[in-house]
Amino acid sequence: MRILGIESSCDETAAAIVEDGVNILSNVVVSQIDIHSSYGGVIPEIAARSHIEAINPVINQALSDAKLSIKDIDAIAVTHTPGLVGSLLVGTLAARTIAILNSIPFYPTHHLKSHIYANWLSGNQPEFPLLAAVVSGGHTQIIYMERHDHFEIIGTTRDDAIGECFDKVAKILGLPYPGGPAIAKAAINGDPKKYHLPIPQVSDLDFSFSGIKTAVLRAVQKDLNLPITTPSHELAAKLSNQQIADFAASFQATAINILIRKLKTAAETHPAKSIVLAGGVSANQLLRTELEKAFSKTHQVCYPKPEYSTDNGAMVASAAYFSIQAGDQPTDPYSLDISPRSAIY
């Protein structure tokens, strides 16, 4: 079964063709990072306009790379929730139009579900039941899955997502957007124990990351002997390269420590064979290393290849395939609506 997957929920325009949920025939991604980096974050209106320019060429390239025509496609899957309104509209309108014109079965797909299924594209397919840590710029959740298409959210963030926190701390330190890769690179030369940052005491399996970025801000101000009224945008120029590296390393280690601790607690109450990483932050090498240390002796540890950690169309197609195998029925493309926010289902 060949599925065309389309993704446009934020700042990547992507399309891919995947066969039987695991075999990638093509995967095309056009990123907008260079456009948004000068703003320090994604500008929704600019993102939507960029998607409009890129969507048709990306889909055509995906078909060309797979050496297929649209007549060879058995189903179309597209991200319809959650995401930026304008961005979602571009991808879903393109997918709906193709489905209608060519009478192809149409499957709207949840973005976070797709990130989890990126693990099925990496060869080391997870075993059920599993615990998935969905970690990205917009989400931090622990999801328990007993089988395909069963999603139970057992932990979520009460404020900032972990990826958002990486972005904001990077901004304090004067590092470029996106913050995750920038902090990871700076942290290589830093001391993760140089600065003590608090670990929020949140009950159950939920997360809180907003206090950590504030703690970093206060620690930087203190290290520079500046009052707490000093604006954050004035701090980076006063920091030495070593200070930046030490703050980056200390923050990264603390944030990952929080995530690992919560996953350990989740594993105690939810029997699982596999521990799975999903979402953009899953590309962080320290996170992968710490996850292996914590769970490799007791669980199968899975994470996507780096190229499938960030948004892409292949993960959308894979998620749709396994939903179809679980009994999901096609949606009428005329009736589909988008949703900027929704829980995984």
Image (cartoon, rainbow, N blue to C red):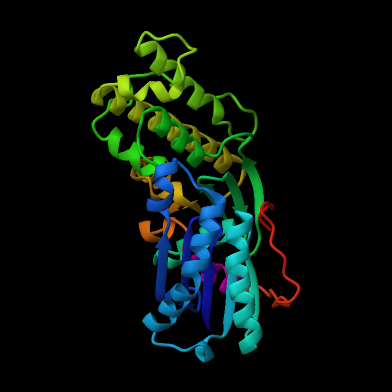
Magenta-tinted stretch = 314-323
Q: Chief secondary structure of the magenta span?
A: helix
Q: What x and y, as percent, mark residue 175? A: 35, 35
Q: Does residue 271 sit above or below 12 in this rendering? A: above
Q: Does residue 174 sit above or below 54 in this rendering? A: above
Which residue is found at the position 65% from the left and 56% from the top? Answer: 151
Q: What x and y, as percent, mark residue 166? A: 44, 36
The outermost residue toward the bottom is 71
Q: On the rendered structure, is 141 left or right of 29? A: right
Residue 11 in view, yes or no: yes
Q: On the rendered structure, is 213 left or right of 247? A: right
Q: On the rendered structure, is 172 left or right of 97? A: left
Residue 27 inside the magenta-drawn segment: no
The outermost residue toward the right is 335
Location of residue 99 (image quadrant): bottom right
Q: What x and y, as percent, mark residue 38? A: 40, 43
Residue 319 inside the magenta-drawn segment: yes
